[in-house]
């Protein structure tokens, strides 16, 4: 159990300022793979960049 303040948790008083968070033990952790490739070129007053991002 985790106590959270000012994160929009609903409370019994309905003020939405604090509350307790209870996790779900049946959930499995999220696994992902991220790939990013970037290039940047700068010469005199010119600047160019290119980036590629993939989230599997």
Image (spheres, rainbow, N blue to C red):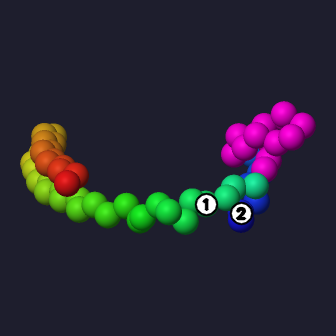
Q: Which mark is residue 52?
A: none
Side (left or right) of 43 relative to 19: left
Label whose residue precedes the other's in the sequence (1 or 2):
2
Magenta stretch: helix, strand or loop mostly? loop
Vertical position of residue 14 compared to residue 2: above or below? above
**Alpha carbons under labels 1 and 2: distance apart:** 8 Å
Residue at image position (14%, 48%) is 52
Side (left or right) of 23 relative to 54: right
Q: Is residue 42 visible?
A: no
Q: Is residue 26 visible?
A: yes
| Disc 1 residue crowd, few under 14, some 14–19, many 20+, Cα 10 Å | few
Marks 1 & 2, CB-CB < 8 Å contact: yes
Side (left or right) of 21 relative to 48: right
Q: Secondary structure at mark 1?
A: loop
Residue at image position (18%, 59%) is 35
Residue at image position (69%, 55%) is 21
Is residue 47 one of those drawn in magenta?
no
Residue 56 sits in which quadrant?
A: bottom left
The x, y position of residue 19, in whole percent, is 78, 50
Q: Which residue is mark 2?
A: 2
The x, y position of residue 41, in whole percent, is 10, 50
| Disc 2 residue crowd, few under 14, some 14–19, many 20+, Cα 10 Å | few
Vertical position of residue 6 compared to residue 33: above or below? above
Viewer-closest of 29 and 45: 29
- Tell me how many marks there are: 2
Mark 1 or 2, which is nearer the eye?
1
The x, y position of residue 31, in whole percent, is 32, 63
Vertical position of residue 31 compared to residue 44: above or below? below
Q: Residue furthest top?
A: 14
- Residue extent of the magenta highlight: 7-19
Q: Which residue is mark 1?
A: 23
Viewer-closest of 10 and 7: 10
């Amino acid at each position: 159990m985790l106590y959270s303040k000012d994160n929009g948790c609903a409370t019994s008083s309905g003020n939405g300022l604090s509350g307790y968070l209870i996790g779900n033990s049946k959930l499995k952790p999220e696994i992902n793979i991220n790939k990013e490739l970037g290039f940047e070129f700068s010469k005199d007053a010119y600047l160019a960049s290119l980036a590629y991002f993939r989230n599997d």
